[in-house]
Image (cartoon, rainbow, N blue to C red):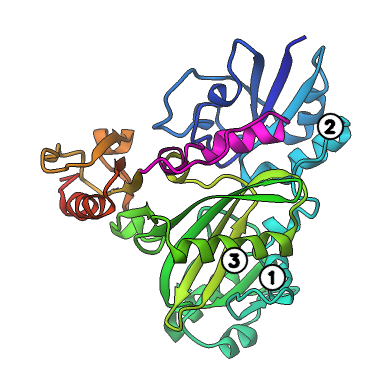
Amino acid sequence: MRTTIVALQSKQPFTAAPAVAFPAAEFDLLVVTDGPADEVLREDVTGPAPEVAVLDREKWPECASGFDGPVEVVTNDEYCLADCARLRAELGLASRHPRQPAAYLDKVVMKRLLAAAGVRVPRFHAFEPLVTAAALIEFGLPAVVKPRQEANSRGVTVLRTPQDVSEWLAEHDGEAGWQVDEFVDGTLHHVNALVRDGAITPVQVGRYLGPLMGVHAGRTLGGVTEQESAFTAAVHEFNERVVRALGSEGAFVVHTEFAVNGAGELVVLEVAGRAPGALVSELAKLHAGVQLEVANLRMQAGLPVPEPVAQDVQAAWLWPAVMPGQRFHEPDLTGLRSEHEVHVRRVGREGNRSDGGLIGASVLLWHHDPDQLDEDVARALDLTWFS
């Protein structure tokens, strides 16, 4: 009997077509969302569009239990992880999400557990129960204020001046659900692994080209894989300590973002019990032979995934910003020696009519020579993508 896959989605679109994880020849697939039906897939995703049901969240249990035959409920959306875990439990399905979801969802719980295990995290303060001016001022500047439970840099603000503090407090004083971190100055990285019932399998280490913020002001976001070295070996060992501290029971992808500060310390900034966004999953496919989002979805459904194997390929991604009044300008890509794919988003093709920068294109580059890849990334950053 065929298994029905119910894939939950809300705010974070799928970065790979769910049918790649669950082929139509073997599975029936339904995406259930409480958001817009036309936004369940990221705009640059190729492959067959899934059947989509738009339902209020309270109706999700009824939907998932209304099928004849076996059902698996999965998600890669940060905003659906807790619901997915609860729904799987209600349906009597195996528990494959982290046993303590808050360890991977609540930034304060996360940092408390890591600090207790001796893992370096930023100095932080939880506004409990509410935001107060005194606590924020005493923390010092610069500081980074964040919601305790959000993703994709939503709500994150760097406060650098007393004026920044005053403006932020005017908007948020007396609210619940916030925390503040010290500002960690250093290079930003990520590390990814497969977690399967206590076994932690390294996949890749990557370096961000800078903060994952600033698109509104025209900043190009991006990242590149790190070739295997003593540094990446140390990072994978470090990440195993992170996962052990937060919980390694279940079957999921872990994505740890960290900074290397001026003293050479690895400082954990955030950890997610799901596959990463941007084009990081695509980089993992090129670099290690594992598409992280596909792997995360399949592991939740109890299905096998390939073991990571080095592919002798380094890869990078860029998200150039399109500013108000601009539209796509065909750049000269003949100078790039790396293999590359470019997807221009709708706002890039039709023109940006908003009041700030937006992600206008997705650029994927790969080459077996890391030095050549670095040259091509620098060349791509200098190209005029929009005018």
Quarter containing the C terminus: top left
Residue at (48% x, 17% y) in the render: 48
Q: Nearer the viewer, residue 386 or 367?
A: 367
Residue 65 picture location, percent across and down: 83, 22
Residue position marked by numbered label 3 in the rendering: 238
**Could you say whether the residue bearing mark 3 is in a helix, strand or loop?**
helix
Asked if residue 9 shows in the view, the reply is: no
Q: Residue furthest bottom?
A: 138
Q: Which residues are magenta?
A: 283-312
Label 2 sits on what residue type? Answer: Leu
- Determine whether the residue tagged by mark 2 lies in a helix, strand or loop: loop
In the rendered image, residue 216, in percent from the top left (x then y), is placed at: 35, 56
* Image quarter in which the N terminus is found: top right
Relative to 154, does residue 325 appear above or below in the rendering?
Answer: above
* Residue that numbered label 1 is attached to: 114
User: How far, Cα to Cα, is label 1 from label 2?
Assistant: 29 Å
Report, in whole angstroms, how far the alpha carbon at label 2 lies from the one at label 3: 32 Å
Rendered image: mark on residue 38: none
Task: Look at the image and say whether residue 311 sits in the magenta stretch.
Answer: yes
Residue 130: horizontal and vertical position, in percent? 71, 73
The answer to whether any part of residue 354 appears in the image is: yes
Relative to 225, residue 304 above or below: above
Query: Quick check: 301 left or right of 210?
Result: right
| Nearer to the camera, 133 or 28 | 28
> Which residue lies under the disc numbered 2?
93
Other residues around mark 1 within 10 Å, as few (<14) / some (14–19) / many (≥20): many
Does residue 179 sit above or below 308 in this rendering? below
* Amino acid carrying mark 1 in the image: Leu
Tell whether label 3 touches label 2 (CB within 8 Å): no
On whether residue 307 falls in the magenta region, the answer is yes
Q: Residue at x 53, y 66 (%)?
A: 234
**Image height of 282 relative to 193, above or below:** above
